[in-house]
Amino acid sequence: MTSKVYFVGVDEWNRPTFREIGARRYFCDTDNLVRYDAKEEEIIDRYKRIGTASICYKGSQFESEPMGDPADVEILTKAEAQKLSRPEVNREWARDIILNFEPALTREMVDQYTDSELKEWMKLLKIKTSF
């Protein structure tokens, strides 16, 4: 299965390091080293040219040492990663979020909210909706 990853930085050995979206799994490239100040755009352009075959699993921490096992990864920009890691919520999920955020409200009260009221709550909490 392909892991969707995004660039998080360069480790102490000048290895470009990536993090899997929604997980604490890190990956790096031990064959193609980069400068410490390498920018995300440079890294993404490089791997579009050379491919991701040299990227391997690193571990559950940024500082971990590479395991050497090749990894099947797809590199995304941080903006693309944020879109994937923050799913849009539906009405039922929005109601649950409101109940968790505001314990003074009851389920019956929140069930009577209109779509516009639910959306207003989600807007205040900076959460995208799909309804």
Image (cartoon, grey):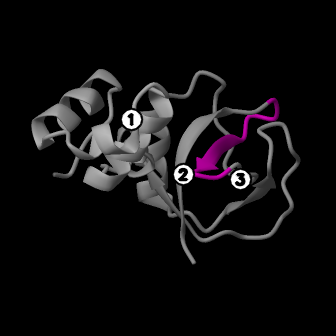
Label ID, residue 51: none
Q: What residue type is labelled 3?
A: Arg
Q: Which of 36 and 119 is in front in this view?
A: 119
Residue count near mark 1 (Cα–Cα under 10 Å), binned few <14, some 14–19, many ≥20: some
Q: What residue type is labelled 1?
A: Ile
What element does badge 1 sit on? helix
What element does badge 2 sit on? loop
Q: Which amino acid does label 2 sit on?
A: Ile
> In whole angstroms, how far apart are the C-alphas of marks 2 and 3?
8 Å
> Which of the 4 image quarters holds residue 124?
top left
Coordinates of residue 50 in the picture (x, y in percent): 50, 60
Residue at 55% x, 41% y: name it: 7
- In the image, residue 14 lies in the stretch drawn in magenta: yes
Q: Tell me the magenta residue range.
A: 12-23
What residue is shown with label 1? Answer: 98
Residue at 45% x, 25% y: name it: 104
Coordinates of residue 35 in the picture (x, y in percent): 64, 28
What residue is shown with label 2? Answer: 21
What residue is shown with label 3? Answer: 25
Residue 58 showing in the rendered view: yes
Q: Is residue 53 left or right of residue 74?
A: right
> Which of the 4 image quarters holds residue 70?
bottom right
> In whole angstroms, how far apart are the C-alphas of marks 3 and 1?
31 Å
Whether label 3 touches label 1, CB < 8 Å: no
Coordinates of residue 116 in the picture (x, y in percent): 11, 35
Residue at 30% x, 49% y: name it: 88
